[in-house]
Amino acid sequence: MLTAFDGTRKIDRTIIALDCEADKAIAIAYALAGRAKWVKIGMTLFYAYGTDLVKMLKDRGYQVFLDLKFHDIPHQVLGAARSAAETGADMITMQTSGGVPMMESAQQGAREGAARIGADVPVTLGITVLTSMDQATLEQVGVMRPMQEQVLSLAHLTQVAGISGVVASPQEASELRAVLGEDAYIVTPGVRPSWAAKGDQSRIATPADAFSNGASHIVIGRPITDAEDPVRAFEMIAEELA
Ligand code: C5P
């Protein structure tokens, strides 16, 4: 599928999720510096090590995906996005269920934070429905329509709000690409090379399939972080995608 991202190598659009202890995360990031372009840190590491960790990764030359999934009133989210952008983060997330005004505020905050440090505005992504939710848990929180309809309708709101795109499962990527158009960021976790263990991910695709389904970027964690040789695991993924 032709997308606005075709000019860059797929391996440079592969994001390594550093969901491990800080020492190990830093060791892996250092070992892969210069080879991998993107790393993702989430709440566990960020709440423990904060902006220092982001700066350390930036100093190693990484683009940093800071996955904190904002969900609060617009005023608070504006400040959160501004502070996140000021750390130098290159990609940030929010819950689309926070609504259009909240997402617009996140976008404004991202712009303001980037301006303060003279950086590019980070990519702003909306989470539609968490992949841990099924139809039953969706209904428990009052959403009665089918999952797919809910995902597509929330994804549409990211465009209304003017944010960069969505985080989605690789199975949803092709339908989302058709709805969101060529320029949208569609970032997919749940990616497993054929040689890797599935772990707790159920709706998975290989790196190549995730990209051909329409992902602009893929997120891979444990197949790299749990590998005996993370550098070799990364190189095998690069070879697969070349
Ligand atoms: O180790 P693994 O490759 O499964 O890591 C996937 C990463 O993507 C984790 O950081 C996880 O939190 C994140 N993620 C996910 N499913 C979502 C959203 C984020 O697996 N729907």
Image (tube, rainbow, N blue to C red):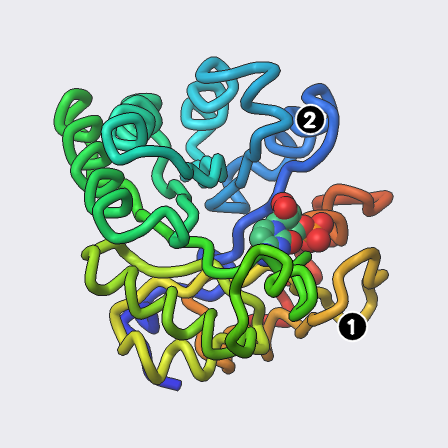
Q: Going 21% across and 26% down the picture, which residue do you hit? A: 113
Residue 151 lies, with reference to residue 37, above or below; the image says below
- Classify mark 2 as within 8 Å of ligand 1 or not, answering yes or no: no
Count of numbered tags? 2
Q: Can residue 97 be seen in this view?
A: yes
Q: What element carries label 1?
A: loop
Mark 1, residues whose alpha carbon is within 10 Å: few (<14), some, or many (≥20)? few
Q: Going 76% across and 53% down the picture, which residue do you hit? A: 223
Position in image of residue 45 (x %, y %): 61, 24
Q: Is residue 234 visible?
A: no
Position in image of residue 34 (x %, y %): 50, 39
Residue 144 lies, with reference to residue 46, above or below; the image says below
Whether the residues at callouts 2 and 1 have beta carbons within 8 Å, the answer is no
Is 209 left or right of 107, judged from the image as shown? right
Position in image of residue 105 (x %, y %): 21, 39
Give the residue at mark 2: 27
Task: Kindly report the distance in space between the C-alpha atoms of the residues bearing marks 2 and 1.
Answer: 25 Å
Give the residue at mark 1: 194
Residue 209 lies, with reference to residue 196, above or below; the image says below
Q: Please name the amino acid that badge 2 sits on.
A: Ala
To which quarter of the image does residue 29 belong? top right
Q: Please name the amino acid that badge 1 sits on.
A: Ser
Q: Going 37% across and 72% down the picture, which residue do you hit? A: 153
